[in-house]
Image (spheres, coloured by chain):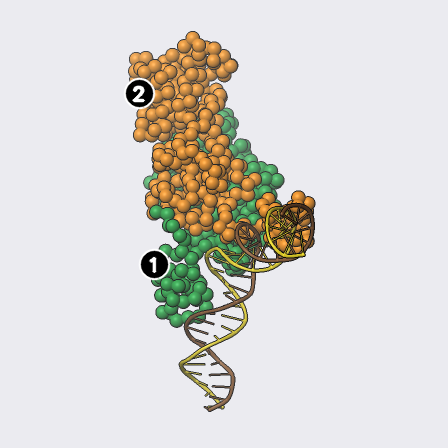
Chain colours: A green, B orange, C yellow, D brown
Amino acid sequence: MAKAERIRIYDVARVAGVSVATASKALNDTGRMTEATRTRVKQTAAALGFRPNVMARALTGQRSFTIGLLTNDTYGRFTLPVMAGINEALVDQGVSVFLCVIEDDAASGMVHVDAMLDKQVDGIIATGKRIDRRLPVDLSGLPVPVVYAFTEGQADAVTLVADDRQGAREATEHLLALGRRRLVHVTGPDSFASVQSRADAFSALAGADAPVLHGAWSEAWGHEAVAQLWAQPVQPDAIFCGNDQIARGVVDALRERGVDVPAEVSVVGFDNWEIVSAATRPPLSTIDMNLKELGREAGRLILDLAEGKPVEPGIRTLPCKLVLRQSCGGEMLAARKDEVLQEV
Amino acid sequence: MAKAERIRIYDVARVAGVSVATASKALNDTGRMTEATRTRVKQTAAALGFRPNVMARALTGQRSFTIGLLTNDTYGRFTLPVMAGINEALVDQGVSVFLCVIEDDAASGMVHVDAMLDKQVDGIIATGKRIDRRLPVDLSGLPVPVVYAFTEGQADAVTLVADDRQGAREATEHLLALGRRRLVHVTGPDSFASVQSRADAFSALAGADAPVLHGAWSEAWGHEAVAQLWAQPVQPDAIFCGNDQIARGVVDALRERGVDVPAEVSVVGFDNWEIVSAATRPPLSTIDMNLKELGREAGRLILDLAEGKPVEPGIRTLPCKLVLRQSCGGEMLAARKDEVLQEV
DNA sequence: GAGTGCTGAAAAACCGTTTTACCTGATGTG
DNA sequence: CACATCAGGTAAAACGGTTTTTCAGCACTC
């Protein structure tokens, strides 16, 4: 299985009967030569199973065909799907990804960034646990391009995030389309910009008087929120939650109170973390942030930047999509959503 | 912040007043020279902030200071802690890690392995979702060393796994020490070797007639198992579960039946997946597999192999540890565990 | 005093590509 | 026909290190 000797471009050139320079140009589609020569070289290269030595190629000042992915998301909840997307976008281009999981202190961050720069990465993609929790390391003024995915960077940086507004709108519209009218939004700390965006979008549709409750990103807060809501004289008939963990807490709390989900109350989560959303009883309808697609896009962007193509800075959003399971009821209505919305 | 020009070894040599050859040898602690010269060169290098170009260094046929981590664990449940450990062990050595998340088909696996070999990795660490689910790609006969972490490789390979027997023993002993006598083990499919190891260890302590129930690795199976057990005339007073998801299902099912955990029944999980174990009510006592330490060890091993140091092949196990929360009750007893065991 | 052995350091070769500058015919051109 | 132009291709110089070889100087021997 293991090749005894690696074939160099020198071998290809010799077999094809040309010089190394010609071989190099033929394989990289540069320079001038007969089309016949070019294809002949390419064919011999393929026949010999030639794979260029990436180190040597990188040495000539070109690119290293390597990018770095920096994250502080230790459990990989967000990073791994993003990573999968990046890889998907880059593997055909022969680009590999260094993953660095950093702790929440600037020193360790710098060590890893330096290590990446030593390795001559063509670019760095920064991602994190959740938007707004900035990475504890300054990536401005680096000699390589940077793309922020799911984490905010400097104002003039290239940033990719899920469209929180649109996601919240999808959820709220769906609940309204189901005929629900007493909506509540139970979400995370309002220090997060994404929380504010979602709350805005929710209020715009559900009405300014529809309650928005802030707490921790945990199941416990879901329980707590239900306790608060059911202490009121009038209870909601639909709850849109800031993430799936809160949603699971809410659903569990409702079941314990004997409130039927989805018959009496519809619940929609956010994140589509399958390990949570699929295990909830009933399984959660939730907003999927398309992290893999976000990763793909980040990969494409960093590649463009590395190649020197112009990319205009700024925040670009990717649409979320509503994944229907059973916690909001009326899956059948999904198709009718648009027309129903007309009435609303 | 960004250095305008990168300093090369040439600059160090010029400033230190020696030749590049001498500079190289001084920095790598090779060759012969006055100790004075050596330290002088090292000091100038440090003063100038010299970082050797890894590509150039790798080109001379040495090492690339890069290793590959191959996994098919899309959600990163196991991979990311392992990864963090690997990184921790290697970052001081200037070694970086390529992460490749592969799909469950051999073709995509080969593409990524080839990509790693192209990048001249010094070694590959293979890890997966759960032991026994082999990676869908053949890593034997590769031109670089391979270490399997948490996944089985060939018989003559270097493999690192958590000590399932010892972990199961810890759990079972603790339940016995609490005074429980009607133990049950609810676990995953018996096609997994780790499931068998744990079941063996459990049976050896709890008695051959203590039931072992196999099912899926899901919360749903936990519910189902409780339903089966509580249909019997005599119910268990302690349940040891194969993973935290099953354990959570069990705890939820017991609460719904009005069975008090931990007063009436003690429950212990496996994995210490905090997102599950900490959110369960009451929080799960569970077996932690020390994945980070496992990663550190894997990093050390692959480094030794890459440097040509002899490493004897075979499976080496790392101990698990019991993490006490509230689902088994009697945390106070933990200290007395050993003496109580004397009686058993 | 020529040969020998040893030391510290410089010079040169090499790693496998890409890139630049140059060369050689063939072709158009006034 | 002398000359510029150009297509097709080659030799050589990078790239930034490491490794091998060479070399000058010095002390020691016989």
Q: Residue tagged by mark 2?
A: B228
Q: Check disc 2: other Cα within 10 Å, few if <14, some if 14-19, many if 20+.
A: few
Q: Amino acid at mark 1?
A: Ala
Q: Which residue is depicted at the point 40% across and 56% down?
A: A7
**x, y (%) of residue B230?**
33, 17
Residue B270, numbered circle: none
The local secondary structure at tag 2 comes to helix
Instruction: Residue at 43% x, 41% y: name it.
Output: B145
Instruction: Say above or below: B238 vs D13.
Output: above
Asked if both marks, 1 and 2, belong to the same chain, the answer given is no
Task: State the mark number for residue A47.
Answer: 1
Which of the 4 quarters of the picture holds residue B208?
A: top left
Q: Position of residue B261 (x, y in %)?
A: 43, 18
User: Mark 1 belongs to which subunit?
Assistant: A
Asked if the residue under mark 2 is in contact with the one under mark 1, i.e. CB atoms within 8 Å, the reply is no
- Amino acid type shown at disc 2: Gln
Q: Position of residue B136 (x, y in %)?
A: 34, 41
For this rendering, which residue is in front, A167 or A262? A167
The Cα–Cα distance between marks 1 and 2, rounded to whole angstroms, is 62 Å
